[in-house]
Amino acid sequence: MRRSRTFLLRIESLGENRGETTLKREHKRMLRYVALRGICLFAVVVVAVYITILIANMGGYVDQIIKSEIRFQIGVSVNQNPAYKNLPPSKKAELIEGLYQQEIKRLGLDTPFILRSHQYLVKALTLDLGRSLYLTSDTGSRLVRNIILERLPATILLFTSINLILFFISITLGLYASRKYGSKLDKLIVALSPFSSIPGWFYGIFLILIFAATLHILPYGGFVDVPPPKDPFHYALSVLKHMILPVLSWLVAYTFIQTYIRRTFFLMFSQEDYVEMAEAKGLPPRIIERRYILKPTLPPIITDLSLTLISSWMGAVITERVFNWPGLGTLLYMAAIMLDSPVIIGSVVIYAYLLAITVFVLDIVYAIVDPRVRLGVT
């Protein structure tokens, strides 16, 4: 009896040791996977930011434009200054050249662009976004960080609301259409989905003509009434009123295509063997949809929603311009028109970090939920 008990204890301890060893291996694989994904994503961010720096500065061509503007402004200020009125033309030229070289050195434009591009890259990656060339915030700040942070909440408010509404509408209608395959609603969704090829801002123009120009029941655009209400409640109501047309324009444009995509997705999963088995067991349709169709499809749907939200935070440039919405889209448009490269680079850096962090978190979630991801199995 003692020998048999000792033998059983040895087997149990051996099993525990093997279990601990397997768990340690899983932890090491998980850490290796997370570290590798983090390094890869950071490398992508570095490359994306550096390419943005090159494009925003046109390979150094913007420097030449800035230098020309500096020389012109200095020349105008010297020629219009009464103190230099009696100076000979040659002395004025020397004075202008001296002031020009001094300003060029102060701005760091006396070094080659390729060297400064690496300095810009290091500063951008450390979120030292510097100062804008022309744009300012509403408070008069030239710091790129302040300019972006001032515009970001408006974009998040508008496009996060739009995408969340689209998400829940498409999920609800997509589930219903997949359950009622071939019904009138299903055929209507399929028939109207090609209309989503027209962008939301195009529908927005017609909505402005109808509800603002003709019916006069909604504002043409903007963020809030002028002057803005002092009471917080009425201020919020004013903002919501100005959000109606841009939200409605995107819903008209993208509801049917999003619903069509979800409906097709749910139809694919509803034809799986385990769904047919659940139907054969006589489970209610609601339970089958929730447990056997919606639950397996949630990871890719959540991934799509997360990436859509992050990408929309850069703002839809044309939509914001059509509705005069003071978000990042309008900011990028103004920065591009004025060749304000620090603002363009700063916006892209913020977006790149947000996107990389979102993808990194999603990768970790998938690695925890699905062991095949950790092991690299497809």
Image (spheres, rainbow, N blue to C red):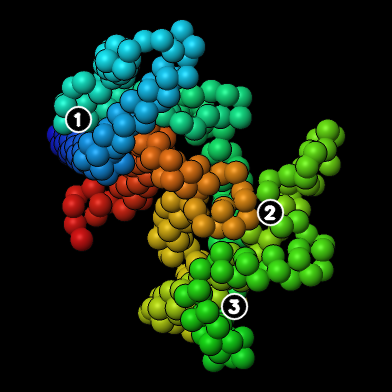
Left or right: where 310 falls relative to 285: left
Identity, as a three-letter code, of the amino acid under mark 2:
Gly
Please tell me whether mark 3 or mark 1 is closer to you in this view: 1
For the point 41% across and 17% down, the residue is: 78
In this rendered view, identify the residue nearer to me: 233 or 336.
336
In the rendered view, tell whether residue 374 sits above or below residue 103: below
In the rendered view, tell whether residue 371 sits above or below residue 7: below
Tell me the residue that label 3 is attached to. 176
User: Which quarter of the figure is the C terminus placed in?
Assistant: bottom left
Label 1 secondary element: helix
Residue 197: horizontal and vertical position, in percent?
47, 75
Label 2 secondary element: loop
In the rendered view, tell whether residue 156 sits above or below residue 165: above
Asked whether residue 272 is in view, the answer is yes
Of callouts 3 and 2, the N-terminal one: 3
In this rendered view, identify the residue nearer to me: 231 or 193.
231
Q: What is the C-alpha distance between the residues marked 2 and 1?
A: 41 Å
Q: Are marks 3 and 2 in contact (CB under 8 Å)?
A: no
Identity, as a three-letter code, of the amino acid under mark 3:
Tyr
Residue 342: horizontal and vertical position, in percent?
37, 32
Residue 9: horizontal and vertical position, in percent?
21, 34
